[in-house]
C-alpha cells in the first residue's frame, strides 16, 4: 500500500524539523564535506551528529561515500539547497509582515 503524497511531504518536513539537520544541509550547500569538517562547524557530540546524518540519509536528503579514510557527505540533489533557499525567503516574508504589524501597532497607540 503506497503512502499518500501529503503524508510523504509531512515526513520530509519532519526531517527538516531539527536545527542540527538544517545546519548540516546548509553546510553541505557549498559541496561535499567530511564528517570531521561538519563536527568542527557544529557544537554537537560526534554521536549526535551521526544520528542526525543517519536521519538525513534515510530521508534521501544526503548521500555518503568514502574518500580514502574519510566519510564524505553531500546533498543528494540541488533541490535540497533550493528548499533551504525557499525556507529563507518564506521566513523573511513572515518576519517582515510581523515587523510591519508591530510597527503599525506601535504607531497607532490605540486598538482598532
Image (cartoon, rainbow, N blue to C red):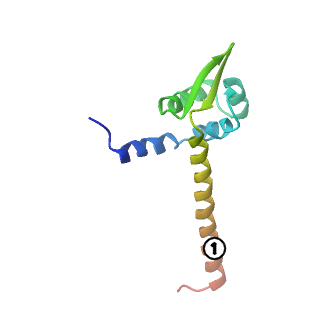
Residue with the mark numbered 1:
100
Rendering quarter of residue 23: top right
Query: In the displayed structure, would residue 39 be above or below residue 86?
Result: above
Counting the numbered discs, the total is 1
Q: Residue at x 63, y 27 (%)?
A: 73
Seen as rendered, the residue at the extreme left is 1
Q: Residue 37 location, x and y as percent?
A: 72, 28
In front: 50, or 85? 85
In front: 38, or 61? 61
Rendering quarter of residue 78: top right
The local secondary structure at tag 1 comes to helix
In front: 106, or 1? 1
In-image side of 64 versus 55 (left or right)? right
Q: Residue 96 location, x and y as percent?
A: 63, 67
Query: In the displayed structure, would residue 45 be above or below residue 89?
Result: above
Q: Residue at x 62, y 50 (%)?
A: 85
In front: 46, or 96? 96
In-image side of 105 versus 40 (left or right)? left
Query: In the displayed structure, would residue 104 be above or below residue 45?
Result: below
Q: Residue 110 location, x and y as percent?
A: 58, 86
Seen as rendered, the residue at the extreme top is 69
Q: Residue 99 location, x and y as percent?
A: 64, 69
Q: Residue at x 39, y 42 (%)?
A: 8
Quadrant where the N terminus is found in the figure:
top left
Label 1, residues with CA under 10 Å away: few <14, some 14-19, many ≥20: few
Amino acid at each position: 500500500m503506497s503512502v499518500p503524497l501529503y503524508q510523504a511531504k509531512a515526513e520530509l518536513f519532519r526531517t527538516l524539523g531539527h536545527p542540527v539537520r538544517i545546519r548540516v544541509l546548509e553546510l553541505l550547500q557549498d559541496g561535499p564535506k567530511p564528517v570531521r569538517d561538519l563536527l568542527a562547524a557544529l557544537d554537537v557530540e560526534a554521536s549526535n551528529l551521526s544520528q542526525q546524518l543517519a536521519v538525513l540519509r534515510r530521508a534521501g536528503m544526503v548521500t555518503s561515500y568514502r574518500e580514502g579514510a574519510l566519510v564524505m557527505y553531500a546533498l543528494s540533489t540541488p533541490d535540497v539547497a533550493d528548499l533551504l533557499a525557499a525556507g529563507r525567503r518564506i521566513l523573511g516574508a513572515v518576519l517582515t509582515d510581523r515587523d510591519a504589524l508591530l510597527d503599525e501597532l506601535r504607531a497607532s497607540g490605540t486598538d482598532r
